[in-house]
Image (cartoon, helix red, strand yellow):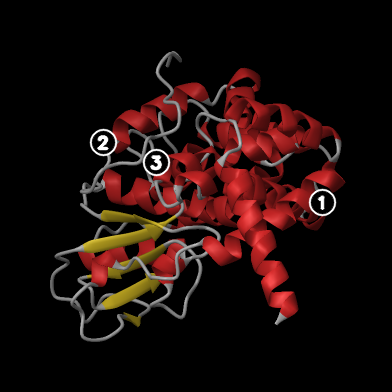
Amino acid sequence: MMIFHSFRRANLLSRNFFRNFHRQQFFKTLNLFNKKPIQFSLIALAGSVALSFNLPYRAETKAIEGATKVPRIVEDLRDVNKIEKIDLYQYEACPFCNKVRAYLDFHQIPYTVIEVNPLSKSEVRFSSYKKVPLLVVNGECQLVDSSKIITAISNHYNFKDHTEEAKKWTDWVDTFFVHILAPNIYRTMSEAYEAFGYITETGNFSSYLVYPSRVTGASIMYYISKRLKNRHNITDERKSLYEGVNVWLSALANKKFMGGEQPSLADLYMYGVLRSIEGLSTFDDMLANTNIAGWYIRMKAAVGPSGRTNKKVASQQSLTTQKN
């Protein structure tokens, strides 16, 4: 009991500290953490402990309110006669979620976005699947895994876009290119903190939890990215990114899109994962050191406006000044 009260007192002190923490002081401290990663991780761990007591426990499952049962997980939509409502559970900066959104946007399929709190994941508590993206169709069934989601949607509407040529490059994006992104956007503590900027825009955190959540998430991903870097045999993050982009551009050659005059499924995959880093230092460096900008802007125009039906989260900085 004594331990519980001591822990509770420490938690309350943490809450008061973060509530009164001045933003300018935070950025000064961030520079110190960038030089001292061990201290940074300890502070982040303390933040995690505080957050575990303060994050909401009520599942924000507005998309399935009124449902009499939990939507079942399915592999396809063969039992769905008509898609009337799509709810996409996502992280705004997730490359796989952006891939699904790019596909829905391109085909002008409307959907509602439910932003998932990356620490509590209370929004997906109704599901046995705790990853994103997660798509709920008509409040009745769940589709999981970005590529399987896209395949199920494609088959339902009979888009016939899963060609052998497209599969070659969609597999390349899924099994190779996407794994280069995390070691790049979380390359340093500062870049990891930058990448977690979307947390301050989604509104899923109480005001005094925004910055400790951002620090905690950034610290965790900084260390995870180092493991991913080793797992995928990446020695130089930026060099690997530029080389990957140049492989894509070499295959693109003089075509407007990988699909020729119109985007193929491969174009949508590549555009989706790259859109997840737009506005970050990694994206700016990629534009400065490769010739991807022309294709990217053509894709942005081809995909068109977002099909989300609810209020859009404040987006990352848009690419508007590059030339074709």
- Return the disc, 1 or 3, that comes first in the chain's sequence: 1
Between circles 1 and 3, the one closer to the viewer is: 1
Amino acid, disc 2: Pro
Nearest to the observer: residue 280 or residue 179: 280
| Residue under numbered circle 2 | 305
Disc 1 target residue: 233
Quote the CA–CA distance across marks 1 and 3: 30 Å
- Look at the numbered discs 1 and 2 and tell me whether their residues touch, using CB distance below 8 Å: no
> How many C-alpha atoms fall within 10 Å of the one at disc 1: few (<14), some, or many (≥20)?
few
In the image, 177 versus 142, the foreground residue is 142
Residue 244 image position (x, y, % from top left): 66, 38
- Using residue 189 as the reference point, say whether residue 161 is left or right of it: left
Question: Which residue corresponds to the image point at 53% horizontal and 38% vertical from the top-left?
Answer: 197
What's the amino acid at mark 1?
Asn
Q: Secondary structure at mark 2?
A: loop
**249 shown above or below 217:** above
**Left/right of residue 215 with respect to residue 152 in the rendered view:** right
